Amino acid sequence: MMQAPKLGNLSQSIAFDEYGQPFIILREQDKQKRLRGKDAHKANILAARSVAQILRSSLGPRGMDKILVSGDGDVTVTNDGATILQKM
C-alpha cells in the first residue's frame, strides 16, 4: 500500500482493487465528530448550493455541455443533469 497525501487531519492510504483501480482508505474516522443541529443544516445548504451552481449552466435551451474526466481518464461530454450528478 502507498501512502497518500494528508487530507486535513486524516491519515490515509491508497490501495488497489482487483481491476487495478485505486481507492483511498481513510483512518482515524472514529475521532471525527458528526455535525449536528445548525452546523449540519449549514453544511447541507452549502452542498446543495454548490451542486446547483454546477448544474445551473447546463440547464435550459441555452445550456452548455460539461466535460467530465474520471480518475482513470475516461472523458464524458454531457449536459444531462442526472449524468453529471452520477459521475460526480
Image (spheres, rainbow, N blue to C red):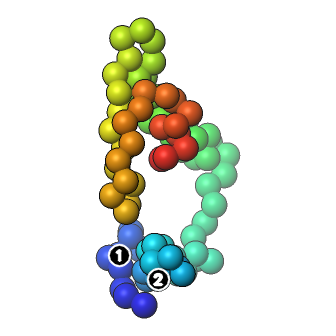
**Does 47 sit left or right of 54 as displayed?**
right
**Which residue is tagged 1?**
6
| Front one among 52 and 73 | 73
Report the residue at 45% width, 18% height from top: 59
Q: Percent position (x, y) of residue 55?
A: 45, 28
Q: Is residue 1 above or below residue 70?
A: below
* Mark 2 residue crowding within 10 angstroms, few (<14) / some (14–19) / many (20+): some
Mark 2 residue type: Ala
Whether residue 12 is visible, yes or no, is no
Q: Looking at the image, tell me whether mark 2 or mark 1 is earlier in sequence order.
A: 1
- Mark 2 or 1, which is nearer the eye? 2
Residue at disc 1, secondary structure:
loop
Q: Percent position (x, y) of residue 69?
A: 34, 50
Q: Name the image quarter holding residue 28.
A: bottom right
Q: Percent position (x, y) of residue 30?
A: 62, 77
Q: Percent position (x, y) of residue 71?
A: 38, 60
Report the residue at 49% width, 46% height from top: 87
Mark 1 residue type: Lys
Q: Where, quadrant-wise, is the N terminus in this rendering?
A: bottom left
* Mark 1 residue crowding within 10 angstroms, few (<14) / some (14–19) / many (20+): few
**Which residue is tagged 2?**
15
Q: Is residue 41 above or below residue 15?
A: above
| Front one among 10 and 74 | 74
Report the residue at 45% width, 73% height from top: 21
**Does 31 sit left or right of 63 as displayed?**
right
Q: Is residue 26 above or below residue 78?
A: below
